Image (spheres, rainbow, N blue to C red):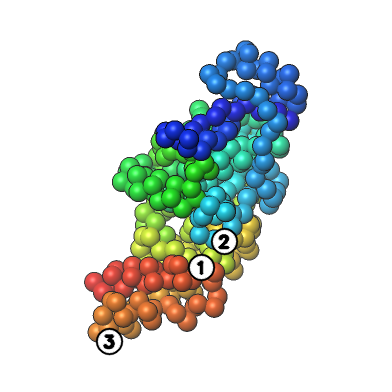
Amino acid sequence: MFEAVVMICAALTGAPCRAALVPGFEAETLAGCEAALEARPVEGALCRAAGGALAVEEVAPGVFAHVGRIEEPDAENGGDVSNLGFVIGEASVAVIDSGGAAWIGEALWRAIRAETALPVRHVILTHVHPDHVFGASVFAGAEVVGHAGLARALAERQDNYLESYEREIGLPLFLGTGAPEVTRAVEGGTLIDLGGRVLELRAWETAHSSTDLTVLDRATGTLFAGDLVFDRHVPALDGSLRGWQAVLTEMQGLEVAHLVPGHGGPVLDWPEGGAPVLDYLDTLAADARAAIDAGTRLADAVQQIGTSEAGDWALFEAYNARNATVAYTELEWE
C-alpha cells in the first residue's frame, strides 16, 4: 500500500520535520497514488510506502478498539495512552476518540483503511482530555461530535493542553497537531446512522469530567464509555466525585453486552467491569469525609485519602493525590 505525505517542520531553522499523512490518496501501487495526486494536486505532497497502522482488535462485529498504553505520555509512547475505536456501518465509519497527537490519528486512519474503504463521516469525542482529542484533525471533512460543553472546555484548555502535550511527547511527533473544532454538540442524547447501524450518544452530567459522552452501538450492544470507566489505570477525577458516583450507579442498569473503557480493557463485562472504579470513588469519598470530620488539613489529608487502594491500580502515585484534593475540596462544602 502507498500513501501521500507532506513534510511539516518546526518553525526554527534546523528543527525536526515529520512526514504527515494526507488522507484519501491510498493506493495499492505507487503509480496509483501518484495518479491520484495528479488528479487532485496537493502542494508539497509525494507518494511513499504506507506508514504503520495502529493495532486494533475487532471486539464485536464491525466494532474495533485500540488499547493505549497504561503510561503517562512521553517521547517513547508518543502520547498513545488512551483507547480509541471505530464502528463500520453500511455507508460510513464513525471514529470514537482520536488520540493525543496527529500521528496517532494518522495511524488510526490506516487501521480503518485496512478494514474498509467507506468514508469516515463522524469523529466522536468522549470528553475534553488531550489524549482523546488531538488526533481529530486528520479526519478532515468529518463531523466532529461531542458533549454540549466540549467546545467551551476546549477553548478554555486547549492552549495549555497543546503546550503540555508537546513538551511531554516532544518534536517531531507532535508536529501538525491541533485542537479540533466541534461541529455537532450533544445535549442529552442523539442518534447517528452509519447505514444499517445506529449509534446512540448520551451526554452525562459532570462526572469524570464536565464533558463526558458515551457511545452505544445498538447492533452489538457495545458501549464506548470513555473515561467514565477505567481498567487497571487508576481513575482520574477532573469533574465531580459525587457526580461520577451517581453516573456510574445509573450506568450499572444499562443493557450492555460489551464495554470499552477509556483505558485498559479492551472490553469489560458489565456491570462487573465498573465495580472497581465505583469502589475506588467510594473509598475517596469515605476517606475525604473522615478527614474533614477530623479537622485534618487538606495538605495532610491528601496523603491519606484513597491510599488503601494503592495496590489495585497502575499510575496511582501520579493521580491519587490530585483525586484526593478534588474529593476533599468538593465534600468539605456538603
Residue position for label 2: 70
**Are dots 1 and 2 in contact, CB under 8 Å?**
yes
Q: Which residue is nearer to you in this view: 96 or 155?
A: 155
Q: Secondary structure at mark 1?
A: loop
The answer to whether residue 48 is above or below residue 53 is above
Q: In this rendering, which labeled residue sits more in front, label 3 or label 1?
A: 1
Query: Of the residues under marks 3 and 2, which one precedes in the sequence?
Result: 2
Q: Amino acid at mark 2?
A: Ile
Q: Residue at x 59, y 15 (%)?
A: 40
Quarter of the image for the C terminus: give it. Answer: bottom left
Circle nearer the viewer, 3 or 2? 2
Looking at the rendered structure, which numbered label has been put on residue 315? 1
The residue lying toward the viewer, choosing from 83 and 269, is: 83
Q: Residue furthest front?
A: 14
Helix, strand or loop at label 3? It is: loop
| x 40%, y 51%: residue | 164
Q: Position of residue 45 (x, y in %)?
A: 58, 22
Which image quarter is the N terminus in? top right
Q: Residue at x 36, y 60 (%)?
A: 239
